[in-house]
Image (cartoon, rainbow, N blue to C red):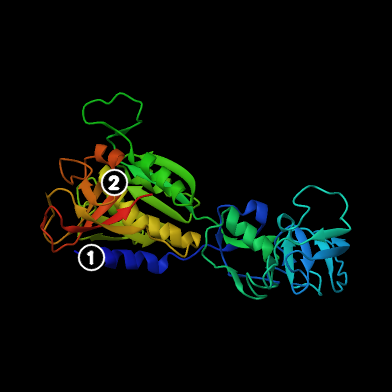
Amino acid sequence: MITIEEHRARILEVARPTPAVTSELAEAIGGVLAADVLSRWPIPLFDNSAMDGYAVRRSDATAGSRMRVVADVAAGSADDPSIGPGEAVRIMTGAPLPSDADAIVPLEQTDLGTAVRERAPEWITVLTQPSSGAHVRRKGEDSAAGALAVRAGTALGPWQLSTIASAGFGQVSTHRPPRVAVISTGSELIAPSATPRRGQIPESNSVLLAAAVRASGAVLTSVRTVADDPAALRRALAVDADAVIFSGGASVGAFDVVRSVLGGEYGVQFDSVAMQPGKPQGFGVLESGMLAFCLPGNPVSVAVSFEVFVRPALRRMAGFADIDRTHVVRAAGTGWNSPKGRTQVLPATFDETTVHPASRRGSGSHLVTSLAAASALAIIPSDVERVRIGDPVSVMVLS
């Protein structure tokens, strides 16, 4: 058997980011930044007022001083009025600070208060002397010209797009989301809403994988279910995608068609990975350049395998700097067994202090109902055969 780390490393070595595309900021929401964005200008662009009030020379604006208002500066104005001794300029938030001023007296700290006035008053009385630089935003105090505004690999949400706009850009370069096809194999599979005959089961793996692909930030191109028939599987491979995910048929059974076809004809490498569940795994790069992930067929194995191997690869292909889930440590709230020589990846629930298996029946790969309750995966090292109450457990958070 190979380790989880070995199989993961082989996958990530070839899971390269997709090509970058350029789009308008309004269309880039949810994209992943392909290159660092450096500010074109200092932010703020110029010294400006942080308050509605009066620009003054601090030395003149002592408590009780009466000052003559000589000008009015609104946001967006290019005016730079002179300020003489005992004079002030009414100024709005965001307006350029007059060159002669070194502080702002807010409206609230004058005798006229915050009453709305269309025209500037002739005189004000200062109630409290401002400190040096009071309520002044200095040029470049947020960031200098050429400074890093948003780092490559960042997912673009409203705040990031606003920062890019403030840095002076109307377009942005993002990675194209990877395109993924899902193929479930098995002659026993029927539609979830159908009534099963003896030996048949509802097909749930494609539902799981399709949703997981979308949640990872990738684009789902197609979903198919095929019987254990080599010819049908070959036809299903005719998809236009960056990656294809198979579920089922990856083990060594007589009817494991995925392994027999992809391993024999397409050069996909199949291994036994030292993990539970999810021991049989296959991975390779097809002649078209499409990545092929071959997962086991049991639902919990599919869920675990996607989180451990497929999701990190899709995140890397999408350009994310951070491809892994958050991990925390919790104390085991109950005891359970773990297989010797294999890393256990167990659907679990957790709170601020403890972690518990999601199923009371343990870690069987067929225990699909445990997935509905799980909010995490408990990771138990391969040298641990028994988890005892209170033992520290590494927990992969699934949200």
Q: Which residue is mark 1?
A: 3
User: How many other residues sit within 10 Å of disc 2, few (<14), some (14-19) or many (≥20)?
Assistant: many
Q: In the rendered picture of this protein, how many numbered marks are placed on residues?
A: 2
- Element class at badge 2: loop
Left or right of 177, for residue 70: right
State which quarter of the image contains the N terminus: bottom left
Image-based side of 302 in relation to 151, left or right: left
Q: Which mark is residue 174?
A: none
Q: Nearer the viewer, residue 262 or 297?
A: 297
Give the residue type at disc 2: Gly
Residue 121 sits in which quadrant? bottom right
Q: Nearer the viewer, residue 168 or 366?
A: 168
Picture residue at 66% right of the left edge, 52% below the top: 26
Residue 58 drawn at (x, y percent): 74, 72
Where is residue 111? Give x, y as percent. Answer: 77, 55
Q: Nearer the viewer, residue 370 or 2?
A: 370
Of all residues, the one furthest to the front in this rendering is: 64
Residue drawn at (11%, 54%) of the image: 388
Instruction: Examine the rendering and report whether any part of residue 47 can be seen.
Output: no
- Callout 1 amino acid: Thr
- Tell me: 181 left or right of 127: left
Using the image as rendered, state which of residue 55 and residue 209 is in the foreground: 55
Camera sees residue 377: yes
Q: CA distance from mark 1 to mark 2?
A: 21 Å
Q: Which residue is mark 2?
A: 248
Q: Quick check: 168 above or below 276?
A: below
Q: State the image coordinates of residue 224 (x, y, percent, origin top left).
A: 41, 41
